[in-house]
Amino acid sequence: MRVLTDPRGYWDDLTTTEQGVTVAIGLIVFGLVIALLTGALGASYFLFLFGLAGMYALLSFGLNSQWGFTGLINFSVAAFFGLGAYGAALMTASNSPIGGGYNPVFGLIVGLALAAVVAVAIGIPTLRLRADYLAIATLGLAEVIRLFMLNERQWTNGSAGLRGIPTFFEEWPVLGTFTEVMPAIEIELVPGSPVILGLTFWQQLLNVVLLLVFLGGTFAVLRRAQRSPWGRLLRTIRSDEDLAKALGKNTYSYKMQSFVLGSLIMALAGVFYAHLNLFVSPGDLDPITTFYVWVAVILGGSGSNRGALLGGFVVVAIREGSRFVNDIGWIPLGGAPFRLLAIGLLIILVMRFRPQGILPPQRELIWPSAVDSSAPSQPDRGVRDVKAGEKNE
């Protein structure tokens, strides 16, 4: 039996790839800490980027529960993201054409309800058909939703967008006044490079708290679902739907459940974005968002919740990091072309050297106790790499 208190046991249990990812993340975090302490990176801006990365991780969770679990091809990630964002904004924004001024929790409920209704409406006529019909339908849905938000000004305020969106905790006790009572703090560890923690920092800090709640809850639900009989059936449908039907399972019902679950998670990301950015417009429903989320899921590993989380942060690192390319004179490309080039090269490298993704889902598909108590010895393939010492014996 392993000694759970020994940190080396945890490290040895990681695969070679997981160890490499852990080291890389540690180096990145160390670099970010240095940049924050020296004032090279603003603390408020860093928390905003962290929130943006978490939003993409939520979107990746949603797509992963559809494509990674069940094999459903959804090209309308931006549409369900927009439904969540607009549902929250229309209920809370000061310039909402349908009233606004409601509590953000009510906006959260409306955003999720809109996504659920649209998911069921698009799933009823398509989920009984081949997967390509769902792909075509969702591709059209994304453009229909974007054009609706752009042109139906009496409902969505059109191209002007929705402003005056409150922070999520604005009307809450204690948290609602947290940013006002917290003093501005100036930290100067490096002479001439002070780090100022002001009103914007405290607002972004509350956003990070909300994000962690959303991410933690979503990850826990998907992790539990993935290892449950429900999750095993979804993987059977993805591998061989005819086999699942032969076993007497109503595959249409299970695909609908998976599709609605993923759409709700995408809408949850939209609700968070509305209260993070405090402004929503039709431009936020750009199809490139769907492309980024697909890249995140493929990069991390289809069917892997850890991979979806990692992929969301990597995509935002490329997307936002490429904005500083214009400040580097020796690079002949602008920020936008460099971003697409970097993502394209990343996809090629992953498909060539790691087609299963950086963090494939093998270790997530079974309960840890099943591995630890396996007899006569723990498996050395599939869920963990063969140790160098075991190879030599």
Image (cartoon, rainbow, N blue to C red):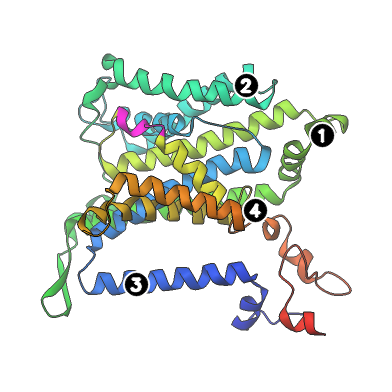
Which is more N-terminal, label 3 or label 1? 3
Q: What's the amino acid at mark 4?
A: Gln
Residue to which mark 3 is pinned:
31
| Foreground of the two, 234 or 240 | 240
Q: Are dots 2 and 1 in contact, CB under 8 Å? A: no
Residue sitting farthest toward the left:
192
Kindly state the secondary structure of the residue where label 2 is placed.
helix
Region of the chain picked out in magenta, as a range = 282-287
Disc 2 to disc 1, how far (Cα)? 20 Å
Q: Quadrant of the C terminus?
A: bottom right
Residue to which mark 1 is pinned:
244
The residue shown at (73%, 48%) is 228
Q: Nearer the viewer, mark 1 or mark 3?
A: 3
The residue shown at (20%, 30%) is 94
Which is more N-terminal, label 2 or label 4? 2
| Foreground of the two, 214 or 102 | 214
In this rendering, is residue 346 above or below 13? above
Does the rendering let one see residue 172? no
Q: Is residue 166 left or right of residue 337?
A: left
Disc 1 to disc 3, how far (Cα)? 49 Å
| Foreground of the two, 49 or 315 | 315
Kindly state the secondary structure of the residue where label 3 is placed.
helix
Q: What's the amino acid at mark 2?
A: Tyr
